[in-house]
């Protein structure tokens, strides 16, 4: 758990009547804001909503906000990874750079209170490696490392990841509230 035991955290299953929020924003911030605002109207509690994804420099920032749907609306992680490998075919290793980006928005009662962002730079491998994690973890190698996120396991990944980098200032902000 990225926030540790200092906070009581529950997931969306605690709000069974919550609306399905369509991610229609053009940026991670816009999508996280849509989700935070809509869900905070369903509860008195503080809501944290995130949007995150992979930006590949050689692909002009794709898949970006479409990371989860890169290979189509019904695509799974394997299909998205296969599409990314095909799109990067022929791109030299030194140009296979990119980043995971995460934006977290805090809201309460339909009002946006704050937003936080985190990124982790790295490169994209030419084939998946590792079995831990999800999404593009088998292809993403963080800068300064030789292993993909999927090879590292959650203990290491959760210290380096874009979500961890966004969640650290969230935790500081929550402690000051």
Image: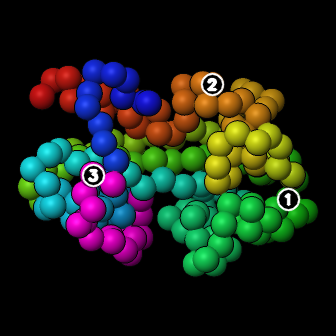
Secondary structure of the residue carrying tag 3 is helix
Please say if the residues under marks 1 and 3 sit with CB atoms less than 8 Å apart.
Answer: no
x and y percentages locating residue 104 in the rendered image: 34, 47
Q: Position of residue 142 (x, y in %)?
A: 68, 35
Marked residue nearer the N-terminal end (2 or 1): 1
Tag 2–tag 1 contact (CB < 8 Å): no
Say which quarter of the image contains residue 27. Answer: bottom left
**Number of residues whose C-alpha sits closer than 10 Å to that of mark 2, classed few (under 14), some (14–19) or many (20 or more):** few
Calculate the distance from the C-alpha at mark 3 to the C-alpha at mark 2.
29 Å
**Residue 14's disc number:** 3
Q: Which mark is residue 156?
A: 2
Q: Quadrant of the N terminus?
A: top left
Residue toward you, 132 or 111 = 132
Vertical relation: 138 (above or below) 164: below
SS of the residue at dot 1? Answer: loop
Residue 68 location in percent, x, y?
57, 64
- Asked if residue 20 is among those painted magenta in the image, a careful observer would answer yes
Q: Residue furthest bottom?
A: 73
Q: What residue is drawn where x is 39% and y is 71%?
A: 23
Residue picked out by circle 1: 91
- Give the answer, above or below, for where 95 lies relative to 86: above
């Amino acid at each position: 758990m990225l926030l540790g035991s200092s906070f009581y955290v529950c997931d969306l299953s605690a709000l069974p009547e919550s609306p399905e929020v369509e991610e229609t924003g053009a940026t991670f911030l816009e999508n996280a804001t849509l989700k935070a605002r809509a869900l905070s109207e369903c509860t008195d509690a503080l809501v944290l909503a995130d949007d995150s994804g992979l930006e590949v420099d050689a692909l002009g920032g794709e898949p970006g906000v479409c990371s989860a749907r890169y290979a189509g609306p019904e695509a799974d992680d394997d299909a998205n990874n296969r599409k990314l490998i095909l799109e990067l075919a022929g791109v030299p290793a030194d140009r296979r750079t990119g980043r995971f980006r995460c934006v977290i928005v805090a809201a309460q009662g339909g009002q946006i209170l704050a937003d936080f962002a985190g990124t982790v730079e790295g490169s994209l491998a030419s084939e998946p490696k590792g079995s831990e994690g999800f999404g593009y973890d088998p292809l993403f190698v963080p800068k300064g490392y030789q292993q993909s996120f999927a090879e590292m396991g959650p203990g290491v990944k959760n210290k380096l990841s874009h979500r961890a980098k966004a969640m650290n200032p969230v935790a500081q902000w929550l402690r000051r509230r």
